[in-house]
Every structure is written in structure tokens, then in C-alpha cells.
Amino acid sequence: MAKIQPLHSSPCSTSSSGVQQGRQAYTVWMKSLVFNGNGCAVYGPDGAVAFRVDNYGCRGGREALFMDRQGNALIRIRRKGFWTFRMWEVCRCTHDGSEEEEATPWFSVRRAKKGGAVVAMHGGARTCYRMDGCSGARKPEYRVRGVDGSVVAEVARKQTSAGVVLGEDVLTLTVAPEMDHLLVLGLVVVRGLINRSL
């Protein structure tokens, strides 16, 4: 498997809101590891491939699978509805040892006014998270905020230790320690599907 060298930095990272302990960073490469495929690869802090996403269809397809490095599906993302009523339903996949996997509804994402998106957990009617910057501008920088408005995850273009900013398809995802990392990674994939970059 491919390996990306991690940046050597202190375990603490700072943000615009102050110093935060234990934030974890992932590198997201918005290209598929499968030849002629559509998807992305997620590299962990150690530089090895941690997760991959493929939709095995056309760019912006109706379904994408979020898999671990062994190819086991962890999340299934499906687009439902048309135009303004479009939403993305995310299901968590479980494996019982057989060939088939069972998918349990987890959360859904809808576009919101002012170029964002709102996330509602399954079984609850209210918004749990908001994604800023999901407009058609395709800017790679955006944030995921909790109900209280605090930033729980942040995505920005990857920058090397020498200060060189990499292409728009290489991103750094920083996740707060109290957040479910799989949930945030699922939101990054949904955002890619919203902007048709997957």
C-alpha cells in the first residue's frame, strides 16, 4: 500500500479558538486508489492508508462505500431525492462473518441555506452538526460545528513542513478528541459528494 510521510509535530495543535489538546490529523487525498475509479484515500497519522472510499460508478454517483484498509465496508452513503429535496443517507455497516453485511441507518445530511449543510442523527429530528462552506465554489477549506457552534473538525489544504501548500485534492482533516472520527470522515465524504469531487 502507498504511504505518505507524516509531519513531525507536537501532539497539541492550536486553532483560531485557542489551544486544544489531543487533536488528530488525517491526510485526505481526493483520488481513488482503484484504477479509473472515483473516490478518495484517507491516510492516518502514521502515513499509512487508513481508509478508502470508492463509488465504482460515475463521478457523483448515487452510492459510495467507505472501507477500511482491508476492504471491509464501514459506511454506506446513498443519495436520495432530487434537486432541492436531495439528501445523503449514511448507514453504518456491520459484519457478522458471512458474505453479506447489514447496514444500520446512522445519520443524514441535507444542504442548508447560505451554502452549508446540516447533519441529523437517525432517530432524532433536530440538527446535530453543521458543515460550513458546502457551496458550489468548491473551496477545499471548511469546518464542522457542533450544536453549540464549537468547531469539532476542520478541513484545509495540506501544507508541508517547509510551508508548501499542496494541490486542492490533498487535504488535512483535524478532528477534536471527543468526536467520533468515523462520523467526521463520513461527513468529509458526503461533502465531496455534494460538490461532486468524488
Image (cartoon, rainbow, N blue to C red):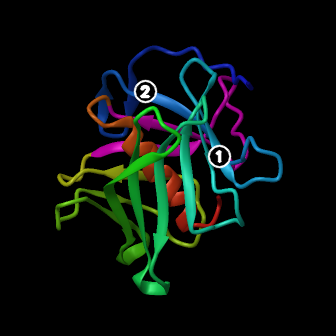
* Residue found at the very far front of the displayed protein: 98
What label sits on residue 40 in the rendered view?
1
Displayed quadrant of residue 72: top right
The image shows residue 38, relative to residue 138, as above or below, that is: above
Say if residue 80 shows up in the picture. Answer: yes
- Is 128 on the left or on the right of 34, as rendered? left
Q: Is residue 174 magenta?
A: yes
Task: Name the residue rendered at 25%, 50% in the picture.
Answer: 146
Q: Which residue is mark 2?
A: 24
On the question of residue 29 being in view, the answer is no
Determine whether, in the image, residue 185 is placed left or right of residue 172: left
Pick whichever of labels 1 and 2 is earlier in the sequence.
Answer: 2
Classify 10 Å Cα crowding around label 2: few (below 14), some (14-19), many (20 and above): some
Count the labels in the image. 2
Q: Quarter of the image for the N terminus: give it.
A: top right
Question: Could you tell me which residue is drawn at 54 percent across and 22 percent down?
Answer: 45
- Which residues are the magenta region? 151-176
Task: Return the residue found at the far right.
Answer: 35
Residue 74 in the image: state x and y as whole percent: 46, 41
125 left or right of 87 in image:
left
Which quadrant holds the C terminus? bottom right
Res. 98 mark: none
Residue type highlighted by circle 1:
Cys
